[in-house]
Amino acid sequence: PPLVRQLNCEVRTVDQDSKALTLRFVNEAKPLEFVWRSDTWFVRNSLFTDSTALTQGATARIHYRWPLFGKRFVTRVVWRTSPSSPLSRSDHPPNKQTTRN
């Protein structure tokens, strides 16, 4: 299997229909596209959430794989929101901790 890699990035776009992310990295001249799968973990403020919580402009750490054939795909997306954000940690009911998208 391909190695898991990690990078910090800025989220440029999130396409829920095609399950695609466009991300900008510090050392890259142009944004790169990644896809996510049903087993991808989305973690906001140390709690599991789903892909709809990820917003444009968020700074995230992604864990991804780049197979020999096929598209780069994320296995985990981790980010934090500010305490004053409407998407704060207290907005999640306890049962959301096991949700994946």
Image (cartoon, rainbow, N blue to C red):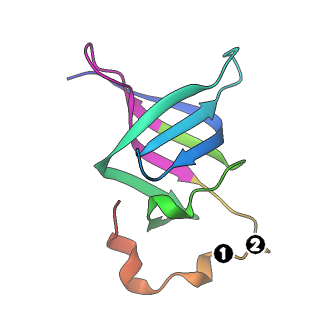
Q: How crowded is mark 1: few (under 14 residues within 10 Å), some or many (20 or more)?
A: some
Structural distance between the alpha carbons of marks 2 and 1: 6 Å
> Residue placed farthest to the bottom in the image?
93
> What is the residue that sits farthest to the left in this orientation?
1
Q: Which residue range is magenta in the image?
A: 63-78
The residue nearer to you, when weighing 29 against 43, is 29
Q: Is residue 67 magenta?
A: yes
Query: Which of the 4 image quadrants contains residue 96?
Result: bottom left
The disc placed on residue 83 is 2
Q: In this view, does 101 lie above or below 64?
A: below
Task: For label 2, count other residues whose C-alpha is less than 10 Å away and answer few (under 14), some (14-19) or many (20+).
Answer: few
In the rendered view, would you say 24 is above or below 48?
Answer: above
On the image, the x and y values in percent for residue 15 come to: 51, 47
- Which residue is at 75% across, 65% downward? 82
> Dot 1 lies on which element?
loop
Q: Is residue 2 left or right of residue 95?
A: left
Amino acid on which the number 2 mark rests in the picture: Pro
Vertical position of residue 20 compared to residue 6: above or below: below
Q: Residue 91 or 11: which is nearer the viewer?
A: 11
The answer to whether residue 5 is magenta is no
Q: What element carries label 2?
A: loop
Horizontally, residue 70 falls left or right of residue 18, namely left
At 47% from the left and 58% from the top, the residue drawn is 51
| Residue 89, position as x, y percentages in the image | 60, 76
Amino acid at circle 1: Ser
Q: Residue furthest front?
A: 17
Mark nearer the N terminus (2 vs 1) = 2
Residue at 46% x, 86% y is 93
Q: Residue 88 carries which label?
A: 1
Q: In which quarter of the image is the N terminus?
A: top left
Q: In this view, does 84 lie to the left or right of 25?
A: right
